[in-house]
Amino acid sequence: RKAGREFDALCCIYPTAVLTRAATLQSGLELLQANKDAACVLGVVAFEHPVQRALVVRNDKLQMLQPEHAHTRTQDLETTYHDAGQWYWIRTAALRDPEFRILGPTARPLVLDALESQDIDTEQDWTLAEAKFRLLRGGSSA
C-alpha cells in the first residue's frame, strides 16, 4: 500500500508444495472470486481412511476413538478432509481482521486429488512424494 499498489488477494505457497499444479492454483483463485463471502480458499485432501474408525493405544491397550462406529462399514462413514499444507488464497482485507483464521468459517475448500498432496514427516513419506512427483510429471525423473 505504501508503494501505491493494492491487491484484492494474495497466494501463499509453501516451499515444500512441490506437487502443486498451476491449474490447481488457478482453480483456487477462481473459487475465491466466485464466493464473495469467502475470505480464503485452501487445498484440502480426504483422509485415506475414515477418521471415525481411528484407533489409539492407551496403557498398551487398543481403543477406538469413536466406538459407536466399530461396526459401521467404512463406505458408509462421512468423508473427512485435512489441510493439504500446500497453499492458500486469501483476500488481503481479511488480513486486517484480528479475528480472521484461515481454518475458520469464511474458508472454502478446494478438494485435491490424493496424488497432488503428500505430507512429509518420514523418509517413507519422502519416497512417496518422489513417486507422486514422477507420476504427475508423466513418469520422468526430473
Image: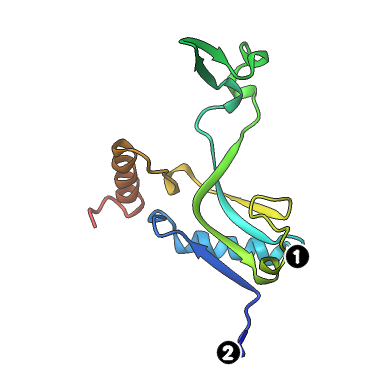
Where residue 8 is drawn, which disc sits there?
none
Q: Residues within 10 Å of mark 1 (few under 14, many from 20)?
A: few
x%, y% of residue 118?
A: 41, 44
Left or right: 133 with respect to 17? left
- Ranked by sequence position, the earlier of labels 2 and 1 is 2
Instruction: Return the residue found at the far bottom.
Output: 4
Instruction: Return the residue found at the far right.
Output: 37
Q: In the image, what residue occupies the spot 30% across and 44% down?
A: 131
Quadrant in the rendering for residue 53: top right
Left or right: 11 with respect to 35? left
Q: How is the image coloured?
A: rainbow
Badge nearest the viewer, 2 or 1: 2
Q: In the image, what residue occupies the spot 40% across and 60% down?
A: 15
Between 72 and 52, the residue placed more toward the observer is 52
Where residue 3 is drawn, which disc sits there?
2
Q: Is residue 58 above or below residue 94?
A: above
Quarter containing the C terminus: bottom left
Q: Is residue 99 above or below residue 119?
A: below
x%, y% of residue 120?
A: 38, 43
Q: In the image, what residue occupies the spot 53% across and 19% down?
A: 55
Q: Amino acid at mark 1?
A: Lys
Q: On the image, numbered disc 1 is attached to which residue?
A: 36
